[in-house]
Amino acid sequence: MPAQLISGTELAASIREQIARRAAELTELGHQPGLAVVLVGEDPASQVYVRNKVAACEKAGFKSIMHRLPANTTQTELLALVNTLNHDDTIHGILVQLPLPSHMDSHSVIEAIAAHKDVDGFHVSNAGLLMTGKPLFRPCTPYGVMKMLELTGINLRGAEAVVIGASNIVGKPQAMLLLQQGATVTLCNSKTKDLKAHCQRADVLVVAVGRPNMVTGDMIKPGAVVIDVGINRLPNGQLCGDVDFESAKAVAGWITPVPGGVGPMTITMLLQNTIEAVERRLSQH
Ligand SMILES: NC(=O)C1=CN([C@@H]2O[C@H](COP(=O)(O)OP(=O)(O)OC[C@H]3O[C@@H](n4cnc5c(N)ncnc54)[C@H](OP(=O)(O)O)[C@@H]3O)[C@@H](O)[C@H]2O)C=CC1
Ligand SMILES: Nc1nc(=O)c2c([nH]1)NC[C@@H]1CN(c3ccc(C(=O)N[C@@H](CCC(=O)O)C(=O)O)cc3)C=[N+]21
Ligand SMILES: [Mg+2]
């Protein structure tokens, strides 16, 4: 039996409906959720993502402010904008689109964002809180993946979870969230020996590397849940994931498509985190 599809597009739409309802209530109370998205430079892929994020905000009834800065913006100018947004009470979430131009130090920029507005969850204090099991914001992509896993009904307690890719924004926080749900987690990287053997043990396989079709059907345990985070643009302009969808879907129990999989969930969880920021501020005043 071929794998069941986990539609990120559909799950995202149903979560966004709830978010829009809550946003309307919060607006009614005088607290319209506000997200600021900062894009430096003209990277075409980043422009697409940022446009999608702003459109999703508007559709959900958020206030969304897009700050587009030229590629030659200085780090000092960017830090000044971040500081202004930190002090703007109409803004609950701040997202600085990565990657930043090479003349900037993204670490310092992320650290400049007020941790309570860091809806990406990338600030070191948010990474630390996640690690200790008391997250303020869960990074959007891994958070979205957890929602997709919930939809499959898989019991993560004692499950073998393998994450391929160990970046600070996807792989590492993904491993933490899986661990917190009781999975036995293996986190693989470019030095991993015999990746195939690790994958074949996985009840849950999350792939976040950035290499087209690197995971093939022969690497997958029959019935496994396979989550493809990768977004790769092929020379012909087509988007594809890190998983070879055709061979994988013949073996997996559940699988996410690209596009229409994790990507739309990432944006949804960005909205979710912004709502959480508003709720938190309300409960503290
Ligand atoms: N759908 C979505 O919403 C999102 C999608 N993405 C996509 O996910 C992918 C990963 O992104 P990101 O985490 O930022 O990537 P990074 O480039 O930051 O990290 C890649 C990771 O993959 C590991 N890796 C590289 N080659 C191999 C290999 N042959 N075998 C095993 N591991 C390997 C690297 O190992 P090492 O640590 O040893 O270098 C590293 O840990 C990209 O395609 C990106 O576009 C990213 C964010 C959101
Ligand atoms: N500060 C910051 N936060 C991020 O969350 C962040 C970032 N920087 N830099 C880049 C990555 C990547 N990312 C994606 C979000 C949505 C889709 C998405 O919606 N993808 C659609 C397709 C979009 C298309 O057509 O290109 C899909 O998969 O169906 C993809 C990728 C967020 N990132
Ligand atoms: Mg996707």
Image (cartoon, helix red, strand yellow):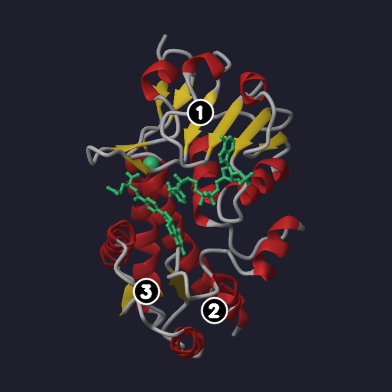
Q: Is residue 274 left or right of residue 202?
A: left
Write down which quadrant ligand 3 falls in: top left
Report the residue at 57% width, 64% height from top: 121
Task: Please state which amino acid type lies under the numbered disc 3.
Answer: Val
Task: Please state which amino acid type lies under the numbered disc 2.
Answer: Leu
Decide which of tag 2 and tag 3 comes sooner along the chain.
3
Mark 2 packing: few (<14 Cα in 10 Å), some, or many (20+)? few
Decide which of tag 1 and tag 3 comes sooner along the chain.
3
Q: Give the percent coordinates (x, y) of residue 27.
A: 36, 76
Report the residue at 46% width, 74% height from top: 94
Q: Give the percent coordinates (x, y) of residue 220.
A: 55, 18
Question: Hey, which residue is sitting farthest front in the picture?
Answer: 103
Q: Give the percent coordinates (x, y) of residue 124.
A: 67, 68
**Residue 1 appears in the figure:** yes
Task: Please state which amino acid type lies under the numbered disc 1.
Answer: Val
> Can you tell which mark lies on residue 226?
1
Placement of 115 over or under 80, stated as above or below: above
Question: Hey, which residue is sitting farthest left in the picture?
Answer: 236
Decide which of tag 2 and tag 1 comes sooner along the chain.
1
Residue that mark 3 sits on = 40
